[in-house]
Image: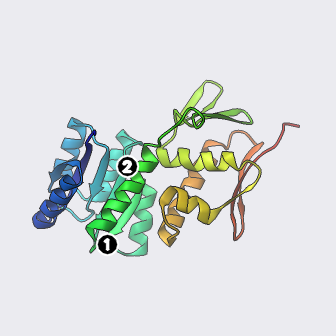
């Protein structure tokens, strides 16, 4: 079994060591850093399957670290672990590009479940039947490669963007139930997961904006519909 590599940023030494120990007991290889500067040095030096990031850290805070990570790598999953429980902080975290946001105090069991859900989204187990392509007007979406192509231009999608676009494609011209999408991709129907999905819908709309025949429509109180119309 291949060990998943986790980069853990936590300035509370005791909490960091406890988290590191529990993660290692559950089969993860963990690199622990006490601040964002150390974390970025490790991130540049190595390859990681997941980043667990405290927000309030010395030298470089978690939001700054996450922005730098996203400039370098759109794919690696990132979960904030923080005492900052304000709604504005959570929304800011999702806008930066985190995959989940867990407020302290939390249980190890909840953390492991959140990690499992995020890693499942970022590394989908594909069968031959799942490795499909979708033609959307002038776009072609390659779910297996997580690429949206129009002409010779490719957009590399994040795992969450790919999963959400796939659900929309599977339900083409039909309403994708909002709660169904939240359960399948985020693993829950919480307010903040819903806000995260709204952010990803906005990103997908930007990627698809160059073809007026392709549109993601909001269906009030129900969900979203990917509508593809034939050119006039």
In this picture the colour scheme is rainbow
Which badge, 2 or 1, is on the more N-terminal residue? 2
In contact (CB < 8 Å): disc 2 and disc 1: no
Q: For the residues carrying marks 2 and 1, which lies nearer the camera in this image?
A: 2
- SS of the residue at dot 1? loop
Bin the neighbour count of mark 1 within 10 Å (Cα to Cα): few under 14, some 14-19, many 20 and up: some
Residue shown at 60% from the left, 66% from the top:
179
Quarter of the picture holding the N terminus: top left
> Label 1 belongs to which residue?
84
> In the image, is 213 to the left or to the right of 196?
right
Residue 198 shows up from this direction: no
Quarter of the figure with residue 17: bottom left
On the image, the x and y values in percent for residue 52 come to 28, 55
On the image, the x and y values in percent for residue 215 come to 72, 48
Residue shown at 14% from the left, 66% from the top:
12
**How far is disc 2 from disc 1 in space, using C-alphas?**
20 Å
Nearest the viewer among 100 and 28 is: 28
Nearest the viewer among 63 and 107 is: 107
Quarter of the picture holding the C terminus: top right
> Label 2 belongs to which residue?
77
Nearest the viewer among 25 and 97 is: 25
Residue shown at 15% from the left, 63% from the top:
18
For the view shown, which residue lies furthest in the right direction? 232
On the image, the x and y values in percent for residue 183 come to 54, 62
Asked if 40 appears above or below 17 in the picture, the reply is above
Residue 168 shows up from this direction: yes
């Amino acid at each position: 079994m291949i060990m998943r590599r986790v980069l853990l940023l936590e300035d509370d030494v005791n909490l960091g060591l406890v988290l590191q120990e529990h993660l290692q007991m559950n089969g993860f290889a963990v690199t622990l850093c006490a601040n964002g500067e150390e974390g970025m040095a490790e991130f540049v030096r190595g390859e990681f399957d997941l980043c667990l990031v405290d927000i309030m850290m010395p030298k470089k805070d978690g939001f700054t670290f996450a922005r730098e990570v996203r400039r370098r790598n759109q794919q690696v999953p990132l979960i904030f672990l923080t005492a900052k429980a304000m709604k504005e902080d959570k929304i800011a975290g999702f806008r930066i590009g985190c995959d989940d946001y867990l407020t302290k105090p939390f249980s190890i069991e909840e953390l492991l479940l959140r990690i499992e859900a995020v890693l499942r989204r970022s590394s989908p187990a594909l069968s031959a039947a799942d490795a499909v392509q979708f033609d959307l007007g002038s776009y072609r979406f390659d779910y297996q490669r997580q690429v949206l192509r129009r002409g010779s231009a490719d957009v590399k999608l994040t795992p969450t963007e790919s999963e959400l676009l796939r659900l929309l494609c599977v339900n083409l011209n039909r309403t994708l139930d909002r709660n169904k999408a939240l359960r399948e991709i985020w693993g829950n129907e919480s307010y903040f997961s819903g806000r995260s999905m709204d952010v990803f819908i906005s990103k997908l709309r930007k990627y698809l904006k160059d073809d007026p025949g392709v549109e993601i429509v909001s269906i009030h109180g129900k969900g979203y519909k990917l509508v593809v119309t034939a050119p006039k």
